[in-house]
Image (cartoon, rainbow, N blue to C red):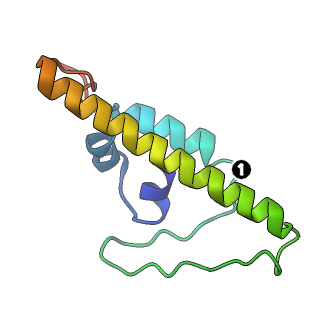
Amino acid sequence: MIRLHYEKGYGEDRISRIIPVGHTTVNRWIRIFAAGKETERRIMPGTEIKEKKTSPESDTVTKAEYERLKAKLEMAEIKAEAYEELIRVAEEKFKIQIRKKAGARR
């Protein structure tokens, strides 16, 4: 969610439609989790983002630590994809809504 806000330049309302939570929750999460970050440049949608490649030799992180963190990140991404697929299949099979709709009823 923070990545969508800072790198893609998405607003709270657009993020709340992508991630099924209210826009005030998105606003609060941005304030909480981005508070410790250094000021980041907002990039407008449609522009290409060039990722800065870091190597273990250029940082204080050892190569073993770098590889361990890389493997841990891969497992976390696989786990997140598995949960998303599990929810999608359950919603289709049991015809129930698991994800919360964005926004409140009025």
The image position of residue 35, as x and y in percent, is 66, 47
Q: Is residue 72 above or below residue 66?
A: above
Q: Position of residue 58 (x, y in %)?
A: 82, 81
Residue bearing mark 1: 36
Give the residue drawn at x 28%, y 49%: 14
Figure label count: 1
Residue 24 placement: quadrant? top left
Please rate how many residues cluster around mark 1, counting C-alpha atoms within 10 Å: few if below 14, some from 14 to 19, many from 20.
Answer: few
Asked whether the viewer can see residue 66, the reply is yes
Q: Residue at x 65, y 60 (%)?
A: 70
Which residue is painted at 32% across and 40% down in the image?
16
Give the x, y percent position of residue 106. Answer: 16, 18
Residue 90 place in picture, x, y as percent: 22, 24
Please say if 25 is above or below 6: above
Left or right of 89, for residue 10: right
Which residue is more in the foreground, 89 or 46?
89
Q: Is residue 18 above or below residue 87?
A: below
Is 82 positioned to the left or the right of 39 in the image? left
Does residue 56 appear to the left or right of 10 in the view shown? right
Residue type of the residue flagged with mark 1: Gly
Which element is circle 1 on? Answer: loop
In front of the other: 87 or 30? 87
Of residues 77 and 33, which is closer to you in this image?
77
Q: Is residue 106 visible?
A: no
Q: Residue at left 40%, top 63%?
A: 9
Q: Tell me which corner region of the image, top left, top right, bottom left or bottom right, holds residue 8.
A: bottom left
